[in-house]
């Protein structure tokens, strides 16, 4: 059987998730035995319009980028959204709550009206085309990336946690960030990062998005225990958790 | 995107729509007829992200976390520049230990980024191939050396920053988690052991140096400057066109940003129509302060006292790989001697405005913020290294193309792509 062809494309983002793929080091060489990369602009000069799997990094902020994304969708059998910008807009969504014209003038001043500087509200990939699989995080966890790609190639459903960060944080034996009087999003955010931030002495920012069917009662209990309110929690959700958080109310 | 090359005897038309093997999206457009150049442009079509507007209203405690996302490859540098600016605004003093650990973390990013650039993005040009992938089969020894160095740099970053990309442990006032003495001892051993790998990589590049075009264009070089130190973190703004330095707080009068119709990223100029930042600028300003092994390689790689070949930026990056490893070993030694002390970060937010500058792998980076009395950000201005290089890339094109215009279009295109790559641009960073 011939190896599936894979293309990686980037839109508005920091390209840090692609870097996590490079950071697989030797494991990337192993993955290259299983797949055939046909386009990856950041690493290769080759280009091809024919591929089985398209991996999309970044958010969409311009009509021309949305059109390019639609063409990629037409070409691909499987489309994967890679990282928080692609799965939910990421930090780039912070501007969505602001007046777009004012945002442009703040950055570009008198030149803001020039046609090449046009930008619209940030959209996640699934808001424009059908997404078959989301790889969460800002940045993604590259071990999870490797595992997901291998599952996909083996025809299995990749494992993506449906429980919150608190589960992994407790497994690590960390002291709860609420004990430090901090507001941590661990109770409502999807695990899979190994509780990376709380394990390094910082609260969870919510970069992997809202967990499906969050245990709201448990979150209330945590808030009550530490004298915080759900509004305190919500006030921190706009950093990363973006539109997904809003849809969960 | 597909490259489109049309050529005939009399004309040269090149449209590179998205240069490959660089961070972000840049285009090269050339039109020439009968040897006369009608148009040569470095274009930046990258989608702008508006970080300066987006951080307004955010808490002083979250700024470095947000702006780290400007750049995946220089996230440590962005976090540090933000933290320096916040500390300047709120008059926060940090301990010597924090200062040393930050520099140590920052060096990991320089090694990681330089190895990535020279080893993965530039090396294919030296071997005449399109990516590092075929090199894994044809020269596995070299690829494994590069991978070892890259992995070490990432482990080094992970130890101090808590993660390879987008640091977790950096906070205004100090670190949220400190490395242990055993961790530092292990790192010291790894760094000592990596020097033969660095030597091997440098040897390989030295042997292929003649693949870099012999193109010299004298320009203004701008970098952090501090007496006696090949600095990446401390100091004021230095320029090859100026005696003395400019305080970081006045960075806007150095960068003079403006909007170019051919770019979504702003461009910069200071004493001339353009200037260059990055490893070559640092070398040209501070080369006399290099550590011994770095100095030896600068000489062996033929950098000379001052070097004005933009393609040699990659060689200066190699020299800096030695520099950061050599200096890191001294810092670790010093930290181990004093012992790592647990510190409690006691910071209260206050109103104020401040600026911070740090050298990213690809050049000097400036951040400025203003905060209200609750520590909410009310104003931000960021000037990214690649912003400062865009105009210089354009000026290089204008000087370089007439010299190579008689060559086949494919060759011209390749040389121009190599020139862009030499700057190690972070294009998406520059349209922050």
Image (cartoon, coloured by chain):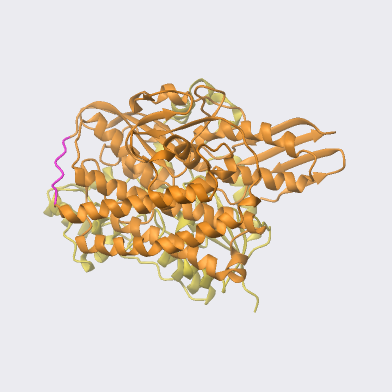
Chain colours: A yellow, B orange
Q: Residue at position x 64%, y 59% from top?
A: B127
Report if residue A58 is visible in the image. Answer: yes
Q: Residue at position x 41%, y 58% from top?
A: A140
Q: Is residue A44 above or below residue B351?
A: below
Report if residue A192 is visible in the image. Answer: no
Q: Residue at position x 66%, y 45% from top?
A: B213
Locate residue B37: give its quadrant. Answer: top right
Locate residue B128: give its quadrant. Answer: bottom right
Residue range in magenta is B342-348
Please provide percent x and percent y for residue B169: 27, 51
Q: Nearer the viewer, residue B133 or A156?
A: B133
Q: Is residue B224 left or right of residue A131?
A: left
Please provide percent x and percent y for residue A245: 35, 50
Q: Is residue B376 left or right of residue A243?
A: left
Q: Nearer the viewer, residue B184 or B367?
A: B184
Q: Is residue B154 left or right of residue B168?
A: right
> For the image shown, how many numbered marks are present on the structure?
0
Locate residue B130: give its quadrant. Answer: bottom right
- Does the magenta run of residues contain B347? yes
- Does the magenta run of residues contain A150? no
Please provide percent x and percent y for residue A29: 53, 70
């Amino acid at each position: 059987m011939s190896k599936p062809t894979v293309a990686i494309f980037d839109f508005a983002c920091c390209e840090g998730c692609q870097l996590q793929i490079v950071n697989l080091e030797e494991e990337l060489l192993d993955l290259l035995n299983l797949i055939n990369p046909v386009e990856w602009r950041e690493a290769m000069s080759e280009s091809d319009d024919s591929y089985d799997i398209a991996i999309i990094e970044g958010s969409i902020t311009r009509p021309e980028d949305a059109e390019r994304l639609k063409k990629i969708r037409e070409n691909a059998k499987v489309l994967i959204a890679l990282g928080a910008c692609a799965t939910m807009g990421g930090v780039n969504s912070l501007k969505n709550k602001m007046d777009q014209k004012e945002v442009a003038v703040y950055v570009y001043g008198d030149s803001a009206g020039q046609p090449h500087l046009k930008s619209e509200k940030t959209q996640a990939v699934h808001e424009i085309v059908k997404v078959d699989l989301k790889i969460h995080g800002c940045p993604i966890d590259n071990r999870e990336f490797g595992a997901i790609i291998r599952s996909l190639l083996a025809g299995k459903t990749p494992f993506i946690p449906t429980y919150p960060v608190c589960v992994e944080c407790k497994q690590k034996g960390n002291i709860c960030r609420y004990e430090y009087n901090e507001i941590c999003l661990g109770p409502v955010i999807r695990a899979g990062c190994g509780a990376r931030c709380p394990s390094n002495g910082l609260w969870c920012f919510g970069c992997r998005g809202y967990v499906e069917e969050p245990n709201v009662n448990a979150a209330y209990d945590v808030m009550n225990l530490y004298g915080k309110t759900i509004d305190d929690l919500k006030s921190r959700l706009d950093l990363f958790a973006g539109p997904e958080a809003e849809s969960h109310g | 995107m597909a490259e489109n090359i049309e050529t005939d005897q009399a004309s040269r038309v090149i449209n590179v729509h998205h240069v490959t093997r660089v961070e972000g999206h840049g285009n090269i457009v050339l039109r020439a007829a009968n040897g006369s150049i009608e148009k040569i442009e470095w274009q930046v079509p990258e989608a702008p992200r508006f970080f300066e507007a987006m951080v307004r209203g955010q808490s002083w405690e979250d700024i470095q976390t947000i702006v780290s996302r400007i750049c995946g490859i220089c996230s440590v540098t962005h976090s540090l520049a933000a933290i320096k600016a916040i500390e300047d605004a709120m008059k926060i003093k940090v301990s010597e230990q924090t200062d040393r650990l930050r520099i140590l973390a920052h060096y990991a990013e320089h090694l990681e980024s330089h190895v990535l650039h020279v080893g993965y993005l530039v090396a294919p040009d030296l071997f005449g191939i399109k990516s590092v992938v075929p090199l894994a089969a044809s020269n596995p020894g070299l690829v494994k050396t590069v991978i070892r160095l890259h992995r070490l740099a990432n482990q080094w970053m992970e130890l101090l920053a808590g993660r390879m990309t987008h640091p977790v442990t950096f906070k205004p006032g100090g670190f949220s988690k400190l490395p242990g003495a055993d961790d530092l001892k292990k790192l010291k051993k790894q760094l000592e052991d990596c020097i033969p790998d660095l030597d091997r990589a440098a040897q390989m590049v030295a042997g292929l140096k003649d693949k870099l075009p012999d193109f010299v264009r004298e320009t203004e070089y701008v970098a952090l400057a501090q007496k006696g130190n090949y600095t990446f973190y401390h100091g004021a703004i230095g320029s090859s066109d100026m005696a003395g330095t400019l305080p970081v707080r006045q960075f806007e009068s150095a960068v003079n940003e403006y909007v170019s119709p051919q770019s979504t990223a702003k461009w910069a100029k200071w004493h001339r129509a353009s200037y260059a930042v990055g490893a070559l600028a640092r070398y040209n300003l501070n080369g006399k302060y290099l550590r011994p092994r770095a100095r030896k390689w600068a000489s062996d790689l033929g950098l000379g006292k001052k070097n004005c070949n933009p393609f040699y930026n990659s060689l200066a990056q190699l020299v800096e790989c030695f520099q950061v490893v050599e200096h890191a070993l001294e810092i670790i030694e010093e930290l181990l001697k004093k012992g790592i002390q647990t510190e409690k970060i006691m910071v209260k937010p206050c109103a104020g405005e401040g600026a911070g500058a740090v050298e990213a792998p690809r050049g000097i980076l400036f951040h400025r913020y203003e905060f209200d009395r609750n520590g909410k950000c009310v104003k931000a201005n960021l000037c990214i290294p690649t912003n400062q290089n865009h105009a210089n890339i354009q000026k290089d094109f204008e000087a370089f193309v007439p010299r190579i215009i008689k060559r086949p279009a494919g060759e011209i295109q390749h040389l121009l792509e190599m020139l862009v790559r030499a700057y190690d641009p972070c294009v998406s960073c520059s349209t922050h």
